[in-house]
């Protein structure tokens, strides 16, 4: 619990172990701590050394003082002793051995000199006076020392150290010594110690009784001894002994610990000062570091925000490097955002027209739909410019692009309330939001359609452009954008189917039809992979030779659920989806394969779609079919319609010539419907012209029809082409056709299309096969 | 007077020499060298010889029985006198002296007397007498009172030669005021042959 607020505080201070600020503060603090630590150590060491040295000196001085004082005192006593020892009467008493007189003189001296001990030692070792306090051993020692010429020193009296002096008694020869003794009282020593500048304890002790560490160091520098954790300095100075067997030592004792305690307070103060310094250093370097790192942290935060896609501006006003960095950063952010906007714009807009592209349009639609209420409608209009490819093909893409731009401008101008977008190529889409439920839908459509009333002008050149328009409404035609767009597209598709240059509103049936188409397409693909197609053959009859000339191969699809499906229904779909290519190849192969089994020169006629012509593989497919089946090329007749010429006349003609040069016959199907441009007939030498069934059917209704047939036959004959009439169902028709000179007929009158298996029976029924090679060869040539 | 004494001494010495040579065979000469324990010769050590058959004490020695005071010193510092001799203490100094002795052999005090005055004191008992001056502590004189004719003091080299000694066993005593011995005197028993006998004696001194 207690840790949390501290943590929060640290976080608020932006404290992180690895942060620059922390590192700077740490380094400075460490530096300062090291420097100050060294200073304190040196100071402490110096202080201690100084203290120890001064104490050592002090002790040495004190020892000297002690000795001097003792000596002075000895001299004083000596002077007092000299007085008596030199006294004639006293000497006489000594010479006479007058002990009572001597003792009385000693007592008198004791009182006068204020010393507790005074006695006479003879040269012969005799003692006179009170010497009971002097041990016998010490007595002998004393005599020896006196004999050796010593005049003063320490003796032991009543087990106490005492200062003693000896004055010689001369009669005039040395007869003995007058000895004065004075115990060195604790108090006296304490008084002596008080003379010292440092607190000293002093005592006279014997060498044997010295602390072990001090023994053997007498007279030299002080010795440090640990006593109960205390540092004690000892200095032992030997002092003169007067005959005792113990060697007296003046021992000075000084507690270094106590002495250093005073210095320690200084060291403590220094240490405290150091700690304060460190704290101040940390605080200061922290502040400095923060002044550096805070802008960096701000920059870092801003960079993070930018990377997350937000806008960020760094508010740094300082004029230093960091400030310039912040300015650069802000400039960079602006540049990035501008570029991003540009990229976004490009991504969502069409480069040519600068209109929203498909993606943006979809998004805008979604947004609009999300806001829309049921009372107001939203219209989606899909536009597809009719035959715009022709403009690009004829005048080039640059001009085509200019036209598209103008279309975009005009759409925007005419439909200011709408969102206009280019969907790609020559497709545009509009969204008209906020349409009142009772608004005139047709009005909007008309206004849109009128955009294309006037031609577009580029470089002074007029380009009349029409557009197919598909319109869907929200919410009726779909609640969501996807459905709405799809339905608008379906309506556009219908408009295109309805002959272009017009508009179509979406109806539910369109969707149904589209669904059916999709289903059919799927079924078609399945049928191709499963081989569900079948070829039926309808006989072609030569009126001239009164016999079969061949069969037209007709595609049948046995749908697993719907039964037989009419080519009228699925061929356009196959063409649209491109499936006609594999289907066409299969038809070609199968027709050739079956025809190869037919007797004689019976031909097989195969329909080829204009879509197949656009594919580059047609020629190969035909040659493959021929080589695989072994069918003679002149027994294959390809039926084409005028539509093959629409795409690329030259290329188509080239291919046709190539096929024909191989010996393959070319027939023009459905002649008379459509444009039936006579120029085609002139530009290509068809082998056969198939007259459309509508003219055959009309034969019964009047002379007009026969006139047309006559004209076609005459024309074909003039161009060296055969004619075939389709849809022959009545005998009268045959008569008329024969009369008009039509060479071939085809229709129910002879036979319905039959499966391949029934072809031999049909051939037999028609009485065999004509064998007229020469005739054929002539025709082929 | 000195000159007469020297001449007299010379005559006596010649006579003694003559006597020795005349009685060669039962007369011995003793030469003693006294050194302290450091090997240094001791001057003014008194050597006395006591033959087993005691000889009669002399009435006097060759030197005068006088102990003068000159330049705050006793002159001579050590004086040998026969027992019963009366010694004169002539004062040649300008100052007065007061001579005393606490020695057992002669305890006396001579009160102050001045220049060119003489006091005398008889020494009836043989022994050592230490003389002091009551007012000049540093003055020290010794009178050796002997009851044997064979006594002399060592010269600067610590030598002493005693003539006319009987041969045979003798007791040689060597005295010096600083000798570390009882009564400052060391005894040596020795046997003297005829002629010259040399002895070296070590006498430890009190420092």
Image: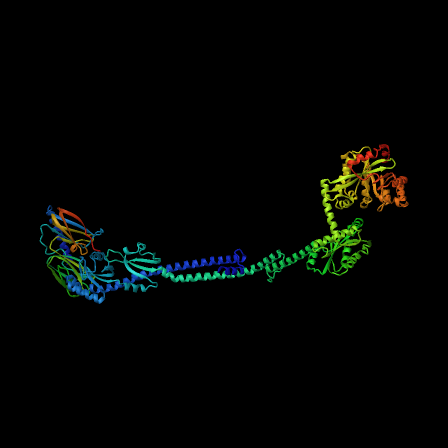
Instruction: Provide residue A315's location: percent of width, then percent of height.
Output: 61, 62
Confirm whether residue B73 shows in the render.
Answer: no
Instruction: Provide residue B190's location: percent of width, then percent of height.
Output: 14, 48
Nearest the viewer among A245 and A539 is A539
Q: Is residue A628 above or below residue B29?
A: above
The quarter of the picture where the C terminus of chain A appears is top right
Instruction: Provide residue A73's location: percent of width, then percent of height.
Output: 26, 63
Confirm whether residue A84 shows in the render.
Answer: yes
Instruction: Provide residue A139's location: percent of width, then percent of height.
Output: 20, 57
Please say which color scheme the image uses: rainbow
Image side of residue A392 versus residue A267, left or right:
right
Nearest the viewer among A609 and B58 is A609
Nearest the viewer among A343 and A539 is A539
**The residue positioned farthest toward the bottom in the image shown:** A112
- Write down the quadrant of residue A42 in the picture: bottom left
Image side of residue A305 versus residue A241, left or right:
right
Question: How many discs appear?
Answer: 0
Nearest the viewer among A681 and B187 is A681
Which residue shows up at 52% across the image and 56% down it? A17
- Write down the quadrant of residue A698 in the picture: top right
Which residue shows up at 8% across the image and 53% down it? B56
Image side of residue A17 versus residue A368, left or right:
left
């Amino acid at each position: 619990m207690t840790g949390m607020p501290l943590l929060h505080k640290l976080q608020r201070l932006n404290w992180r172990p690895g942060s620059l600020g922390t590192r700077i503060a740490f380094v400075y603090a460490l530096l300062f701590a090291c420097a100050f630590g060294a200073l304190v150590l040196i100071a402490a060491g110096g202080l201690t050394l100084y203290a120890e040295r001064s104490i050592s000196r002090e002790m040495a001085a004190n020892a000297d003082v002690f000795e001097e004082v003792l000596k002075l005192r000895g001299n004083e006593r000596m002077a007092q002793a000299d007085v008596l020892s030199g006294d004639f009467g006293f000497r006489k008493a000594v010479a006479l051995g007058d002990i009572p007189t001597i003792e009385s003189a000693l007592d008198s001296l004791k009182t006068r000199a204020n010393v507790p001990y005074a006695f006479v030692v003879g040269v012969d070792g005799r003692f006179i006076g009170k010497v009971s306090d002097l041990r016998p051993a010490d007595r002998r020692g004393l005599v020896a020392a006196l004999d050796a010429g010593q005049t003063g020193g320490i003796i032991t009296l009543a087990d106490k150290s005492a200062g003693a002096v000896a004055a010689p008694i001369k009669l005039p020869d040395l007869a003995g010594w007058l000895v004065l003794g004075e115990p060195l009282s604790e108090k006296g020593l304490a008084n002596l110690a008080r003379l010292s500048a440092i607190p000293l304890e002093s005592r006279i002790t014997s060498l044997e009784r010295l602390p072990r560490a001090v023994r053997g160091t007498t007279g030299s520098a002080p010795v440090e001894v640990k006593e109960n954790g205390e540092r004690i300095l000892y200095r032992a100075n030997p002092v003169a002994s007067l005959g005792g067997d113990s060697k007296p030592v003046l021992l000075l004792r000084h507690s270094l610990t106590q002495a250093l305690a005073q210095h320690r307070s200084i060291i403590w103060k220094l240490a405290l000062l150091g700690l304060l310094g460190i704290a101040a250093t940390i605080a200061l370097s922290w502040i400095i570091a923060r002044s550096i790192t805070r802008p960096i942290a701000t920059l870092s935060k801003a960079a993070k925000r930018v990377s997350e896609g937000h806008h960020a501006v760094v508010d740094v006003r300082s004029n230093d490097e960091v400030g310039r960095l912040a300015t650069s950063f802000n400039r960079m952010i602006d540049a990035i955002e501008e570029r991003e906007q540009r990229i976004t714009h490009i991504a969502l807009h069409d480069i040519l027209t600068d209109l929203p592209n498909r993606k943006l349009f979809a998004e805008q639609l979604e947004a609009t739909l999300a806001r829309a209420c049921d009372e107001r409608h939203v219209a989606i209009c899909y536009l597809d410019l009719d035959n715009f490819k022709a403009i690009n093909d004829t005048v080039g893409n640059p001009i085509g692009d200019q036209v598209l731009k103008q279309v975009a401008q005009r759409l925007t101008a005419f439909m200011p309330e709408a969102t206009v977008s280019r969907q790609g190529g020559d497709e545009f889409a509009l969204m008209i939001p906020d349409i009142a439920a009772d608004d005139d839908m047709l009005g909007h459509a008309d206004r849109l359609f009128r955009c294309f009333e006037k031609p577009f002008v580029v470089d002074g050149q007029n380009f009349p452009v029409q557009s197919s328009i598909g319109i869907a409404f929200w919410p009726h035609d779909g609640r969501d954008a996807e459905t709405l767009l799809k339905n608008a597209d379906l309506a556009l598709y219908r408009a295109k189917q309805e002959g272009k240059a017009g508009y179509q509103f979406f109806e539910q049936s369109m969707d149904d039809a589209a669904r059916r188409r999709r289903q059919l397409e799927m079924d078609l693909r399945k049928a191709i992979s499963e081989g569900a197609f079948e070829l039926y053959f309808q006989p072609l009859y030569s009126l001239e030779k009164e016999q079969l000339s061949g069969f037209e191969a007709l595609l049948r699809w046995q749908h697993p659920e719907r039964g037989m499906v009419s080519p009228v229904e699925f061929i356009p779909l196959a063409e649209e989806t491109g499936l006609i290519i594999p289907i066409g190849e299969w038809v070609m192969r199968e027709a050739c394969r079956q025809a190869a089994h037919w007797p004689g020169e019976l031909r097989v006629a195969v329909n080829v779609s204009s879509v197949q012509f656009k594919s580059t593989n047609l020629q190969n497919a035909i040659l493959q079919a021929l080589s695989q089946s072994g069918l003679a090329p002149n027994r294959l007749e390809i039926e084409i319609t005028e539509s093959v010429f629409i795409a690329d006349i030259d290329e188509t003609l080239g291919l046709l010539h190539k096929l024909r040069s191989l010996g393959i016959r070319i027939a023009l199907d459905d002649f008379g419907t459509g444009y039936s441009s006579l120029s085609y007939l002139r530009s290509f030498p068809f082998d056969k012209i198939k007259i459309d069934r509508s003219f055959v059917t009309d034969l019964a209704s009047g002379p007009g029809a026969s006139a047309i047939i006559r004209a076609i036959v005459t024309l074909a004959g003039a161009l060296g082409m055969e004619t075939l009439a389709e849809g022959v169902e009545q005998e009268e028709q045959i008569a008329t056709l024969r009369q008009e000179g039509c060479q071939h007929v085809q229709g129910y009158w002879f036979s319905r299309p039959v499966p391949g298996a029934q072809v031999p029976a049909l051939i037999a029924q028609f009485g065999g096969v004509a064998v007229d090679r020469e005739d054929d060869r002539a025709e082929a040539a | 007077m000195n000159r007469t004494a020297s001449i007299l001494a010379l005559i006596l010495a010649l006579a003694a020499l003559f006597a020795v040579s005349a009685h060669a065979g039962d007369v011995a000469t003793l030469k003693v060298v006294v050194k302290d324990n450091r090997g240094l010769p001791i001057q003014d050590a008194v050597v006395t010889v006591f033959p087993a058959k005691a000889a009669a004490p002399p009435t006097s020695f060759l030197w005068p029985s006088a102990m003068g005071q000159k330049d705050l010193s006793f002159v001579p510092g050590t004086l040998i006198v026969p027992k019963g001799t009366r010694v004169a203490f002539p004062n040649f100094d300008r100052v007065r002296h007061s001579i005393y002795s606490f020695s057992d052999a002669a305890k006396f005090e001579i009160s102050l007397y001045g220049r060119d005055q003489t006091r005398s004191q008889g020494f009836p008992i043989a022994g050592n007498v230490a003389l002091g001056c009551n007012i000049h502590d540093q003055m020290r004189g010794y009178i050796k009172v002997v009851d044997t004719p064979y006594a002399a003091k060592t010269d600067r080299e610590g030598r002493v030669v005693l003539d006319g000694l009987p041969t045979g066993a003798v007791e040689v005593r060597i005295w010096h005021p600083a000798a570390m011995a009882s009564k400052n005197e060391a005894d040596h028993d020795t046997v003297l042959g005829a002629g010259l006998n040399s002895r070296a004696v070590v006498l430890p001194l009190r420092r």
